[in-house]
Image (spheres, coloured by chain):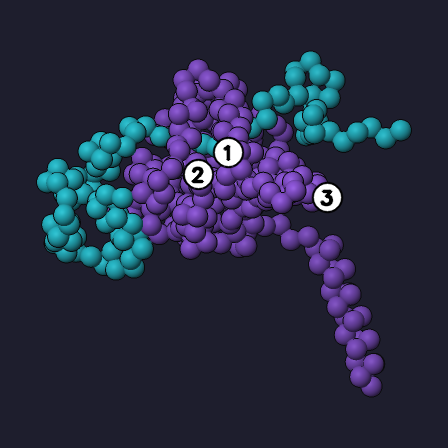
Chain colours: A purple, B cyan
Amino acid sequence: MATRSRLKKAIQGDVEVKLGSLACVGLGMTLGAHLAPRARSFIEDADVVFVAASDPLVELWVQGMHPDVRSLQPYYATDKMRSRTYDEMVAAMLAQVFAGKRVCGAFYGHPGVFACVPHRAVEQARNAGHDAVMEAAVSAEDCLYADLGIDPGTFGCQHYEASQFMMYRRTVDPSAYLVLWQIGVAGDPTLMSRGTGAEYREILLELLRPLYGDDHEVVIYQAATLPMDTPRADRMPLRELLHARLNDAATLVLPPSRPMEPNTAVVARLRRLSTTDGQASTMAGG
Amino acid sequence: MSNSIQFLESMGRSSSVRRMSVAEYEAAVDALDIDQTEAVALKARDASALAGILGARPNMICMVWAPDQAPAKEDDDRSDTDVPDEEAPPAQE
């Protein structure tokens, strides 16, 4: 209804007022390898493009696709909370949408995975009656499965942002994979840090040790952002996480430490059901 | 778009890159119409050097998500709950 109302307002007399729109697309993780045709089309067809890339060369690549590409990087600043940075990114994109422009936000990876800016921008644009869309893309999570040979279906997979994992009580299942994102800034309560150190990671280890033990092998993962790069997959005992080299793109993967525990009571009930079903179908078949 | 960036894009699109020998890779770089410094950076697979030559910004931050800043306080009566205050369901009347 809000959209209709807005559209109605946009047509005044015989003059149609141009309504702005927003498309948030993903660049994928590796330059040139993951950008989907429709995402590229949104970039090329926009009036203005905002870009949040993971690498300076990726940003240059996007800037080569359109004459008006505006980097979102300048919104980050030392001693500035990232939450404020994100507010300003959303506001910058929406200002152009409200000015009647076709706006494209091009974000590294998937625009909707561990990415609050595109989600909020799309929601606010829609609430204001504008057409807004999010295009699915290749995320770091997708690359992780391929590069590390993990199928989330095998044991299950739990994903948390590392700081949130530390600051809230979560129930972890150690018989499934545990993936902690933004491990490089784990535990930063200020949202200003570019990297937290051993003291913060020690607190994280206190949470993980009871479930995994110090000797449990973990993986520091980082997807390749350039085609000449290889993904990072550093395996180490959990205890070495304390002094591991981490940046803002690093992810911690903890394989299961325990076997899955069968729920024998439920299995027995399911077997009884299937036996009953089998008998019923045999009788029905006569 | 610079020739070096176009080259990287074509590498990203190509399935044959991973089978390329060092000599083939260097020959592909030599075939580009680019400055010698760019060619050296590409051959060395030195992304930082290439970014500097092409005038890209030196540092990038790649985080666009932040956790809720205000989990339950220590002195909060409900500090042992799994649900943050602001996301708690409304009390039933």
Q: Residue at x 24, y 38 (%)?
A: B47
Tell me which amino acid carries mark 1. Gln
Q: Distance of mark 3 from mark 2, alpha carbons?
A: 27 Å
Q: Mark 3 points at which residue?
A: A1
Tell me the tag on residue A177: none
Element marked by disc 2:
strand
Residue A30, image x, y percentages: 35, 46
Instruction: Decide if residue A232 is in sight here.
Output: no
- First in sequence: mark 1 or mark 2? 2
Chain letter, disc 1 residue: A
Q: Is residue A281 left or right of residue B24?
A: right
- The numbered mark, 1 or 3, whose residue comes first in the sequence reads 3
Percent from the top left, x then y, of residue A205? 49, 28
Discs 1 and 3 carry the same chain letter: yes
Q: Which residue is drawn at 59% across and 43% down?
A: A16
Q: In which quarter of the image is residue A216?
A: top left
Q: Can residue A276 be seen in this view?
A: yes
Chain for mark 2? A
Using the rendered view, name the quadrant where residue B87 is placed.
Answer: top right
Give the residue at x 32% y 28%: B59
> How many neighbours does mark 1 have within 10 angstroms: few (below 14), some (14-19), or many (20 or more)?
some
- Residue A3 on image: x %, y %: 67, 43
Identify residue type, mark 3.
Met
Please say if A285 is above or below A237: below
Q: In this view of the protein, which residue sits in the foreground, A51 or A170?
A: A51
Instruction: Check disc 2 and report the residue beneath it.
Output: A48
**Tags 1 and 2 touching, CB below 8 Å:** yes
Q: In which quarter of the image is the N terminus of chain B?
A: top left
